[in-house]
Amino acid sequence: MLALQTILDGLVLGGLYALAAVGFSLIFGVLGVVNLSHGAIVLIGAYFTWFAWHVTGMDPLLCIPPVMLVLFGLGYIYQRGLIQLAVDRSSLLASMLVTFGVALMLRNALVLAFSPDFKSISPGWAFSFLRLGPLTIDLVRISALAASLALLGALAYVLNRTSIGRVIRATAQQELAARLCGVNARHVYAVTFGVSAAFAGASGAILGIVLPFSPPDEANWTLNAFVVVVLGGVGSPSGALLGGLLLGLISTATSQLIGPAFPNVMMFLILVLMLMVRPAGLLGNAFAGTR
Amino acid sequence: MLREAIARQRWWILAALLGLAVLACVPFVLMPFHVRVGQLILLSTALGLAWTLLGGFAGYWSFGHTAFIGLGAFAAGLFETQMLGTPFMRAQPLVGLGLGLVVGMGACAVVAGAVAWPILRLRGIYFAVAMLGVAQVLSELTNSIDAFKGSMGLVFPRIPAFGLRQEAVFYYLLLIATAVILAIAFAVKNARIGHGLAAMREDEDTARMLGVPTERYKITMFVLSATLTGALGVIYAHSLGYITTGSVYRTDFSLNMIVYNLLGGMGTLIGPMIGSVIMVVLTQVILGGFLNLHMFLTGAMLVALVLAAPRGIVGTWLAFRRRRRDAAA
Amino acid sequence: MPRIDRRTALTLAGASVLAMPALRSARAQAQGSAKKLVFGGSIPLSGGAAETGLNVNNGYLTAVKYLNEQGGVDIAGTKYQLELRLFDDASDPSRATTLIQRLLDGNADFFLGSFGSNIVLPTAAITERAEKPMVQAGGGSDQIFNQGYQFVFGMFPRATRQFQSTVAFFKTLNPQPKTFSVIATNDAFSKTFAAGIVKDCQAAGYQLIENYLLPEQISDASSVLSSIRSKTPDMLLCAMHDQNSLLIARQMIATGTNVGLLFQGLGPQLASYREALGKHANGIFYSTYWDQRTTWKDPFFESPAKFAEYYGKNFTRPIAYHVAAGAACIITYVKAMQAARSIDPVKVRDALAATDLETLYGRVKFTKEGDGDAVAMGPSVGQVLKSAGEVVYPAGGKTAELLWPVPAWDKKS
């Protein structure tokens, strides 16, 4: 029974990890850029949601669409105005430093805007739970998992079934060929970044309901995204989902079997091993970042 | 090849020796604060040079070199406090420090040697990310396993000052370390291996086809770079006197090593020196008094730096000179 | 075109960078007329400990502003204005040591501390060698106080001694709890605090069921909680910082994990914690070092209430016990200087060591090693009641009646 509870807890946690990482994965896969400011964008989503919930009292889950819209715009501008510039003038690796610089700026800005105190979002239903025989699961986490799955499904639909999705995938596979076919690659890159930022924001909203958060947490969310992406593979929602669920299972199983202090060790150990054995991830494909 | 290079660059070498002599006088002239800033600049320079052995010369950018600062520091600290023990360290602090250096560097060499082959098959961003992971694994292990004392912290024995002020002792230790690492980097750059590495950085597959033993070269440089970084970690830990995981396993250490090189000029020897002077003076001296904006300004500087001088100060200067020469011709 | 832009930008940046130190020294000269007492120190304003840092900082600012408005302080017949010189150490020890040295070179004689032993110890090593005292309200780990330092003082008892009064309180409960489990996070303070909890509880005859160690930053505690549900202790005692405490409490409520008594060392003191949990917070126990309703006599502010009132006029940030602790550092310094009739750092150090005085923060008295006396400066036991923090033990400082036994999460009102 304990094993079943562990698996359940792991899957629920994994859904969160997956959603928090999918944006990172998309940018890495399509643009080849490692976005070290990813965690900060997740936190911006959480703070926006907290603000809306705190001031207007609206349900945090309803805040997700507006948060996504705002962050799409910010992400589009961020990519076109800054990251593309860095890639053009220097290199992909150097653009990683630009995103680190932005992460520092965002973290500082969040401290100034919202104070360094931790914040938490607790709507009325935050403390309810379900009991299925001997298994216990809280409503917050199960609804977070549901929201994650719905959002990941929506993203998969957009990428695979819509015309913009086709253009994004085409550009990721063969930038030159796509450009020859009349695709404005810069616009596509910026849209991709915007979509990633929007999903990061949505995951921030959901994380904010599950966990208390404060500005220094951004580094953790960036690192988690790394592990998920390396586990699952780059650039696809299904890869992120697989990586996220695995990571969730690994961390609950580790704390159950080895000790609650060890999930992080195991997480990064698996990251390094995976990179050595199968750098393209379990569902690896031929996106730009993997070559 | 090395001898020719020495002859060709004798003026640079002379300038470096002269600079060393000047730097050796600094603690007698300046205030302790400036000596400490100097200590930080030397540490940063030496770290930048140790990083560039692999990152600048071979083009393998490690985003997790702080792994070796931490590994060196904790290996030496555990050896000195648990194996040698306090009475020995009190009686023979210098022997203890020397042995600590050997142990710290040895631990880094062993770990780097063990992961070198698989991890160096990765290229570009994948290598960068894998190193980030290595640093995280070591840091989490140090923190989670009680025997490593990462969460409770390690107290280092004091090093006698020989009539000097305490900060001057570490200034001199770091000055020696910097000089040694600079000499090693110079030798590597101008020896056969350095030319092989330069070829590799441009195009690894072609270099291998042309008979450069790329595998052996990059493993050598990885282990060398890790070992030297470990030595700096040992000295740094002693200068603090007490460390926890968070004092030595710091992502900002890793990233700063890259920043120094990028700012100064990737692949050069003078680059990390210029870069570290500028960064330390900016962040610790000029932004030192800012209570709550310095992180924002540091971040903004980083962004501006990559955009404004993508080839670093040395690269920009060379390009400028070339343009002028072309214009004159 | 872009080239010109860049050059102009660089010139501007360079000019402003060069101008900054000049501006600063001009300001320093303008203020140089009155006699000044300089307090230097580092505070963490951008790392994980920034919340506490901000509170302690506001405490310093409140005390200094108030004393200066009263015309300064009188030490052996001379009037002094107080001045703070603080910097953000960003939780980076090399930055902290460098900048502490700058203050030392700039003739700061009295130091205030940072947060976390990996910053406090390296900086204390420097001030100790220079024979300048450091009074700090942020480092409680035992390591700080067993180095044999003579010049370092702390406003809290060392971590392993912070639980003694709480165990005494447990002994007064009826019905008596019998078993306990501990959850600690993996950092020096929480680990030593947890060691103290286990030692004191076992000495009092309580039986340890399980001692859980979690990573320094928790994002999920489900496996620990399912273990607690299967091996339920009478008392669950948490040694961790506030954000982690809230996470544990929330997850306990949201999984229906009930224990007889929940104690969280840090967390319930904060209004944001209690707000986040709503009615569920009621009944949770915590350590409290200060309450503005207590009746201590302060030599400058008269009473904790007056202090809180003055603070409220100057800051919008809610008051917390770290604010009072920060202010008490300054007050303790000033009283020690008045007692020593001198501002010589060594004499002030001796006076600090001999301090036994009543302040807005309570009685201030240090042990021989420099940490707060476990009896005089130890914590009272607090309990959240009607969503407010109340003191329930010891009887003398009580502000409300104890709620015991505590109802299960879903029975709370």
Image (spheres, coloured by chain):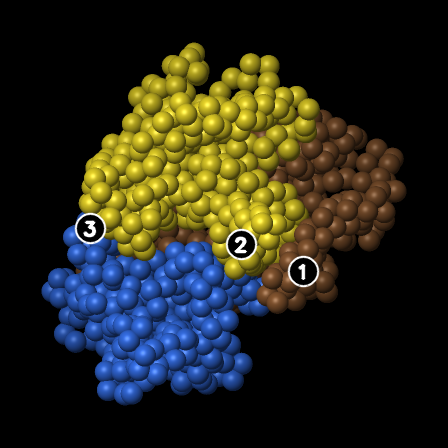
Residue where numbered disc 1 is placed: C8
**Amino acid type indicated by mark 2:** Ala
Q: Which of the labelled discs sits on residue A276, or is there none?
A: 3
Mark 2 Cα within 10 Å, few/some/many (few <14, many 20+)?
A: many
Question: Label 2 belongs to which residue?
Answer: B309
Q: Mark 1 lies on which chain?
A: C
The x and y percentages for residue A37 are 43, 63
Q: Which of marks 3 and 1 is in front?
A: 1
Between the residue at mark 3 and the residue at mark 1, the CA separation in whole angstroms equals: 47 Å
Secondary structure under tag 1 reads helix
What tint does the image give chain B?
Answer: yellow
Q: Which chain is brown?
A: C
Which three-letter amino acid code belongs to the residue tagged 3?
Answer: Met
Q: Mark 2 lies on which chain?
A: B
Image quadrant where one finds the C terminus of chain A:
bottom left
Q: What element carries label 2?
A: loop
Q: Which residue is drawn at 30% across and 44% down?
A: B200
Q: Please state which of residues A8 and B308 is positioned toward the viewer in this rendering.
A: B308
Discs 3, 1: same chain: no
Asked if the residue at tag 2 contacts the one at tag 1, i.e. Cβ–Cβ closer than 8 Å, the answer is: no
Is residue B309 left or right of C75 when viewed as pictured? left
Q: What is chain A's hue in the picture?
A: blue
